[in-house]
Amino acid sequence: MSGSIDPRAVRVTIEDAEPLVVTVVPPSGPAKKGSPTLVDGRPIGARLEVGEGGRATLHGEGDQRRLTYADLPAGEAGSSWSGVRRFEIVVDGWRFVATVEPAARAALRERARRSAAGTAVHHPGVVRAPIPGRIVAVHVAAGEQVEAGRALVSLEAMKMENAVRAPRPGTISRVAVAAGGTVELGDTLVELA
Amino acid sequence: MSPPFRRVLVANRGEIAVRIIRACHELGIEAVAVHSEADAGALHVRLADLAVSIGPAAPASSYLRIEALIEAARTSGAEAIHPGYGFLSERAAFARACETAGIVFVGPSAATLEELGDKLRARRVARAAGVPVVPGTLDPAPLEDPGALEALLQEAGRIGWPLLVKAAAGGGGRGMRLIADAGELPEALAAASREAAAAFGDGAVYLERVIRPARHVEVQLLGDAQGTVVALGERDCSIQRRHQKLVEEAPAPGLGVGARRDLHAMAVDVARATGLRSAATAEFLLDADGRAWFLEVNTRLQVEHGVTELVSGLDLVHEQLRIAAGATLSPAVRAAAATATAPDRHAIEVRIGAEDPARDFAPTPGRITRWRPPGGPGVRVDAGVEEGSAVLAAYDSLVAKLMVVAPDRPSAIGRLRRAVDEFEVGGVQTTLPFHRALLRDPAFLAGAVDTGHVEAAWRPAPGREAAARIAALTAALLVAGGAVGVTGADVSRGGWPDGPGPSPWRTEGRREAAERWP
């Protein structure tokens, strides 16, 4: 493996986990010694046995793990980038959504995003809905000074009332919701200046 | 034996509606389902003989509307209403409305619901019956009167910090707040009251001492209209998060026959004082010295009633329906009560919720795209969903209860571990990985847990991170290793040119160790 990107290399992204770059030797190719699966540049022995009905077993280094998987629509990323695939994979009850794309394309996209980020305005004070639900009460108004930890909004989901708190001290620059309204996961609740 | 009723309306949704509909069918009773517009395609609607739409998704517009339910019973010709748990199950006004309409309410009398369903009054009843009550206030906190706050703060100081703000009409942890000091009290009172008013239509709240460490142990009660009340065994429900139960088992581990008999007797004393009819549960906290403190009575079927059924061999919903039709406690119930202090089986339930155990059990509404529950000997699954069902944000996150029964606790744990490993769910994150880890946790295996155990010991990260690596590798092999459905992305084994490095399998090896909680 010299510095060039292997055409068989894919990058896997899982929410909350470091992306992995994996180079895989396809089954059609000659399975020779010296052409192992590489994970982040390190070789490992791994073999995926794909069974019926969305079940699979990953074998490797004397261990094996049974899991289930399902194809997901490629979503936003897939609409502009060919070769992107998404899977739901459940391991030991943990559910992950994995996005797989050619490593070369991922590298290009990363570069494009980095240069865009340099000119974009950053909003570290946007407080978003951690869960979908209904706004029960808004405890602050625009212009108000708040301390970190102050309850900003009470959000009810699955009959539990949850206080959404200020992540840091600041001045409320905008209240984006009103009592009685409903919000989706990630909707802006309040902006802090 | 002829059916106790010809037709019964089930005023609930989800797994408990399904469970009650099944009991009706077993007794030869026709079941009428009610549903919100959002639940039109739900499993309980499909299983019922008749279904009535009662309003929009929000519970206040559908499952909590007494008039709509009475009207649905009238138009469908139901003779009785089973309220399940939650929603209107403990509301005296509902029982009274049924009575006025000439419909049988499957549950205690309205008077008992008023007496015991209100936690504050239940505390007074228990104290009058000579049963030790958790220290706290005995009257509703005066929310409307700012001048009374000072007196309440003094009262709180006497009870001691931290303390709990609890809803008089509460249940399932709703309308409950743990507060550390006086500064938090006003906000907690207001929030708990609002939550209680929204969930139960009653905003009354009170204060109670936090007993820690404590085990949560409760006694299943059954009474008939003739005034006979029996205890059918206890359940340990100490595995909780945010005051909501995750795991329940019967009998309570490590309890001697004497302690068990005393506990059952206290529960019966409280229930008998109010003439309990139908099923109810008396909840206690066992402190570090093994002393029992009365907490409250839930005047309804509990979520976890199934573990008592598995140990006693009874069907509590069958018994509720017979009692509602005027029958006295059956010989089977009396026999089970006579042996309740010396059970010869052990049952455990784990709640399968649409929640993320890695994110403080936050709800994960969505569509269930894969649903393969386990089976085999000694396994019972009570589910409210099937493949393709939506888990709606408007309702409780509980989607199923997985229960096992075995001759003793170790074999029940082995059976449950096997069943949890078999359970396949896709589309939403569930509590399954939590249960998987708990069933390998030495403290749980030893029966030595208290209600603070989950908060103190649950560490999702190691197991989840190892699983994430495996998922990532699997995804890569699914794409680069050939088409899905073709066996084998065959990869030869490589050496270790740089010496031992991080590998998912090495991480995986550590995972088993990490899952054994400290």
Image: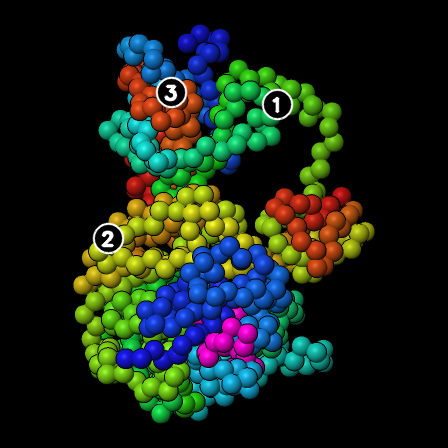
- How many marks on residues? 3
Mark 3 and mark 2: Cα distance apart in space? 35 Å
Q: Residue at x 27, y 83 (%)?
A: B330
Q: Which residue is mark 1?
A: A80
Q: Nearer the viewer, residue B198 or B227?
A: B227
**Amino acid bearing label 3:** Gly
- The location of residue B270, given as percent across then percent down, is 39, 86
Disc nearer the start of the sequence (3/2): 2
Magenta region: B74-96
Residue B424 location, quadrant: top left
Whether tag 1 and tag 3 are in contact, CB under 8 A, the answer is no
Q: Nearer the viewer, residue A1 or A106?
A: A106
Secondary structure of the residue carrying numbered label 1: helix
Q: Nearer the viewer, residue B503 or A179?
A: A179
The numbered mark at residue B376 is 2
Q: Is residue B312 magenta?
A: no
Mark 2 and mark 1: Cα distance apart in space? 47 Å
**Amino acid bearing label 1:** Ser
**Chain for disc number 3:** B
Evaluate whether label 2 is on the same chain as label 1.
no
- The location of residue A83, given as percent across then percent down, is 52, 20
Q: Is residue A48 above or below residue B144?
A: above
**Chain for disc number 1:** A
**Chain for disc number 2:** B
Looking at the image, the residue that sits furthest to the right is A143
